[in-house]
Image (tube, rainbow, N blue to C red):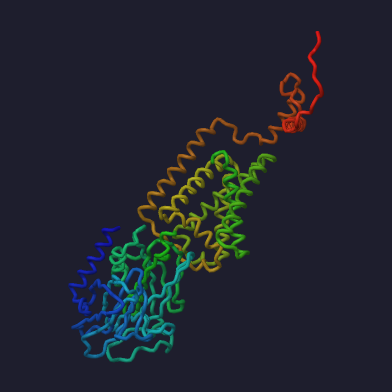
């Protein structure tokens, strides 16, 4: 990490020296990235010269990792002529004969901030991102606005407008909805995952370049969905704290087959300041704990306003109670059907969650809660129904697969893995009314392949060992209460059994208590003692 930091600083200094930033002037070329060190006191003037006459629009953008930067048309920024954030850009509509463009950059931190900047040209037939903005401060706003919680990420952007020649009036944003208006435009939303467990500036600077221009976005990004002008220009995604993600939108004009890109935006879904502060024989107990704890946590989260720690403690208590109840029900009644139904449901929930963890879960039809929960419940119930005739196999499979997945969850506490979101996304869907609108795509990188292999190995070895150990055993022996009852009757009728002469339990407990009482009782004086006369 120290080497990476030094490399970042060195790269920034080289960018400063090679482009004259020491004097506050940054010379740029169209389509070329430049790294620049920004500070709070001395704004940097970014200039592009010799702009070709066929260029009608230039989108200038700057990116930093975690410190806000200010980008402005004027040396003294105003609300309507500037933007502030870690990923910001401005659209310059060129006048006839204009060959030079100028912008101003500065950071809000007292210390120097490494950033990367680029200017991208577009022609008269290319759509203009944010050209029909009615919500944000800038007249033409190409920025994507992002906010996040621990549950979801929300991005929104202003609608685009059609392109036009230099000096012409922009097409009206509200004059009809036909094919000659902006309503013909389509918006493709792309997602790109940064390498796992790498929060360095250099990685972000290198990868943000892959999501800035149209062709590069199509080559490297993953297209999540396409919006038309009839759709709202906001999208929700599942939050992945600690995982770097870049989002961008390509607006496409189907009449001219031209495209333009908005300003890419990135997030780690966490604050950098908080990154640091960040059982075989008891299988029935374990399954009962999972089953009761899961539903109790959902219940108290829904109906109470308790804090997270309180809910966690109560969930543990409820889980222990549920586990003890399932063990007690088996001990007393020996109901194989009830126990295997609970175990089958736990395995079914994990299986169904895994199905919806795949790209199948992002199909639009499953945004409807009724469709989702009916489908999810049907898949989950399919497991206990399919194995109703072979409960021992179901028990072994459940303990092997679910037990090994808990190991994966434990690993996820220390090493990032997307596999933890198999169940976490289900919990979010239950607890949050609006999570159905979030796309739940996650990265699947080297760590995930390794941990998936560990999960498969643990599950396979666990199932294999249990099958070999249990192959000569009775599938389900008599429950303990029945065995104890039979043993008690046998002892009471068989006088040759030594245990027949053992006093009843109540009498034995009474005798023990008397012994304890005598131990603490003082010895009473017996009067004068005389030797025995012979």
Say which quarter of the image contains residue 78: bottom left
Q: Residue drawn 21% across and 83% down?
A: 51
Whether residue 64 sits left or right of residue 288 in the image: it is left
Residue 492: x and y in percent read 76, 26
Q: Quadrant of the N terminus?
A: bottom left
Q: Could one spot residue 180 in this view of the protein?
A: no
Q: Residue drawn 29% across and 79% down?
A: 41
Front residue of 32/75: it is 75
Front residue of 528/181: it is 528
Residue 73: x and y in percent read 30, 85
Front residue of 522/28: it is 522
User: Of all residues shown, which one is farthest toward the top?
Assistant: 534
Front residue of 68/331: it is 68
Q: Is residue 391 above or below residue 93?
A: above
Residue 388: x and y in percent read 60, 44
Q: Could one spot residue 387 in this view of the protein?
A: yes
Q: Quadrant of the C terminus?
A: top right
């Amino acid at each position: 990490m120290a080497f990476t930091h030094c490399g970042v600083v060195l790269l920034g200094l080289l960018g400063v020296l090679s482009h004259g930033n020491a004097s506050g002037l940054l010379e740029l070329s169209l389509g070329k990235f430049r790294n620049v060190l920004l500070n709070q006191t001395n704004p940097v003037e970014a200039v592009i010269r010799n702009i070709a006459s066929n260029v009608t629009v230039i989108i200038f953008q700057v990116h930093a990792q975690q410190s806000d930067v200010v980008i402005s048309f004027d040396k003294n920024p105003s609300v309507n002529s500037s933007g502030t954030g870690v990923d910001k850009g401005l659209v310059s509509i060129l006048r006839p004969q204009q060959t030079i463009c100028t912008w101003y950059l500065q950071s809000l931190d007292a210390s120097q901030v490494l950033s990367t900047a680029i200017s991208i040209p577009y022609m008269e037939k290319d759509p203009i991102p944010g050209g029909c903005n009615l919500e944000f401060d800038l007249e033409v706003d190409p920025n994507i606005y992002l906010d996040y919680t621990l549950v979801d990420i929300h991005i929104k952007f202003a609608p685009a407008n059609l392109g036009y020649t230099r000096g012409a009036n922009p097409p009206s944003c509200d004059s009809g909805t036909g094919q000659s208006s902006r309503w013909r435009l389509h918006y493709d939303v792309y997602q790109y995952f940064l390498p796992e467990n790498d929060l360095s500036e250099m990685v972000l600077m290198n990868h943000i370049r892959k999501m800035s221009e149209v062709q590069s976005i199509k080559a490297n990004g993953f297209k999540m969905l396409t919006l038309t002008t009839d759709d709202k220009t906001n999208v929700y995604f599942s939050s992945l704290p600690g995982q770097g993600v870049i989002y961008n939108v390509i607006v496409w004009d189907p009449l001219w087959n031209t495209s333009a890109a908005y300003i890419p935006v990135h997030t780690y879904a966490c604050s950098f300041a908080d990154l640091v502060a960040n059982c075989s024989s008891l299988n029935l107990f374990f399954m009962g704990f999972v089953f009761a704890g899961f539903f109790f946590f959902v219940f108290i989260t829904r109906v109470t306003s308790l804090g997270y720690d309180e809910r966690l403690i109560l969930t543990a208590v409820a889980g222990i109670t549920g586990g003890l109840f399932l063990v007690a029900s088996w001990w007393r009644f020996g109901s194989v059907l009830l126990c295997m139904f609970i175990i089958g449901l736990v395995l079914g929930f994990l299986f169904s969650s895994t199905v919806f963890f795949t790209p199948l879960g992002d199909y639009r039809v499953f945004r409807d809660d009724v469709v989702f929960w009916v489908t999810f419940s049907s898949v989950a119930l399919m497991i206990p129904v399919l194995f109703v005739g072979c409960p021992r196999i179901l028990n072994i499979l459940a303990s092997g697969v679910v037990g090994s997945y808990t190991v994966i969850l434990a690993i996820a506490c220390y090493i990032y893995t997307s596999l933890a979101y198999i169940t976490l996304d289900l919990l979010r869907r239950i607890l949050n009314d609006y999570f159905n609108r979030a796309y739940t795509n996650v990265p699947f990188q080297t760590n995930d392949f390794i941990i998936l292999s560990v999960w498969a190995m643990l599950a396979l070895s666990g199932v294999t060992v249990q099958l070999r150990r249990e192959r000569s055993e009775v599938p389900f022996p008599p429950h303990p209460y029945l065995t104890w009852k039979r043993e008690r009757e046998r002892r009471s009728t068989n006088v040759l059994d030594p245990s027949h002469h053992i006093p009843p339990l109540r009498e034995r407990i009474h005798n023990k208590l008397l012994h304890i009482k005598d131990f603490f009782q003082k010895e009473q004086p017996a009067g004068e003692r005389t030797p025995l006369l012979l």
